[in-house]
Structure formats: structure tokens, C-alpha cells
Image (cartoon, grey):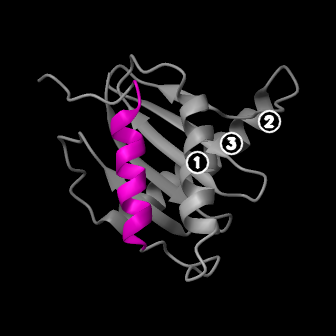
Amino acid sequence: MTIYNLYIFDKMGTLMHYAEWNRTKKSGITREEEAKLTYGMLFSIKSFVSKISPHDPREGFLYYKTNRYALHYLETPSGLKFVLNTDTAAINVKELLQQLYAKVWVEYVVRDPLWTPGTVVTSELFQKKLDEFVKQSPIFGIRNI
């Protein structure tokens, strides 16, 4: 199992943070363009799911899977959106994203007196703790090619 990359968006769609680990293929566009496309796709999928779901979509959209990767999604009550791309074998990713939010985002961003809500996260401590958290997770691994 492996983790490729992570996007963190605020409720307005601004890319707050991006990190990647085992991503082998680049998109060929800028990170900003890729983030806009990702956020737009999420917006569309969430809307689609809420309209066609035969059940009450309380949890809404959680993930989708292709034959190459899986995109996992967590939206917090404050509107933060965590998007984690993994290989297709990754399991329990919802729990991982919830822990990432509680143990890393809240601890090292929300509680950082130097961070202003709505601004891009540039804290080196957050980046270090995020990297440690992801690399210690059971789904992190080096992709065998």
C-alpha cells in the first residue's frame, strides 16, 4: 500500500497545503492548476452524489477508486477538505484522515499563534509532523514499480 499525495483546501477552495510522498507521475501542469482541477472535480462529485443518492447522503462523498489509484475525502464541520490519493489497496483511510485532522492539523496549525485562518500553511513544524504521521501510518509504503 502507498500514499501518493495530500491536498488540504479551506471552505472557499483555497489550497492551504500540499504534500507528496510516493508520486511517480507528474501531471504536467502547475500545482495551482492541478489543485483547481482537483477542487472543481470534488465540488462536482459532491453535488452529483447528493442529487442521485438513493439514501440520505449524510456522510456524502467519501472516496472513489479507479484501476490505478483511490482518492479519499474528508470534510470537517468547519469546511476544511482533506484529499488523500493512495493506491487501490489502501484501507481505513477515513480513520487516517480523521486522525490527521485531530493530531496534526489541530495541534500544529490551529494552535499555532503565528498562523492566521484562511492563509496558506507554511509552518515547518507542521510539515515535519505531517511527514512523520504519514510515514508511520500503516498504509504508507514505497510503491514497487
Report which residue position mark 3 lands on: 46
State the separation of the CA atoms marked 3 and 2: 9 Å
Earlier-in-chain disc, 2 versus 1 = 2
At label 1, counting other C-alpha atoms closer than 10 Å, the crowd grade (few under 14, some 14-19, many 20 or more) is: some
For disc 1, the marked residue is 103
In percent of the image, x 62 and y 64: which residue is there?
10
User: What is the chief secondary structure element of the magenta stretch?
Assistant: helix
The amino acid type found where label 1 is placed reads: Lys
Image location of residue 73, percent across then percent down: 58, 39
Q: What residue does disc 2 label? A: 51
Q: Which residues are magenta?
A: 123-138
Residue 7: say if magenta. Answer: no
Counting from the top left corner in percent of width and height, residue 131 is at 35, 50
Q: Looking at the picture, how far across and down is residue 115, in whole percent?
A: 57, 79
Please, is residue 13 above or below residue 23 in the view?
A: below
**How far across and down, in percent of the image, does residue 22 sit?**
23, 39
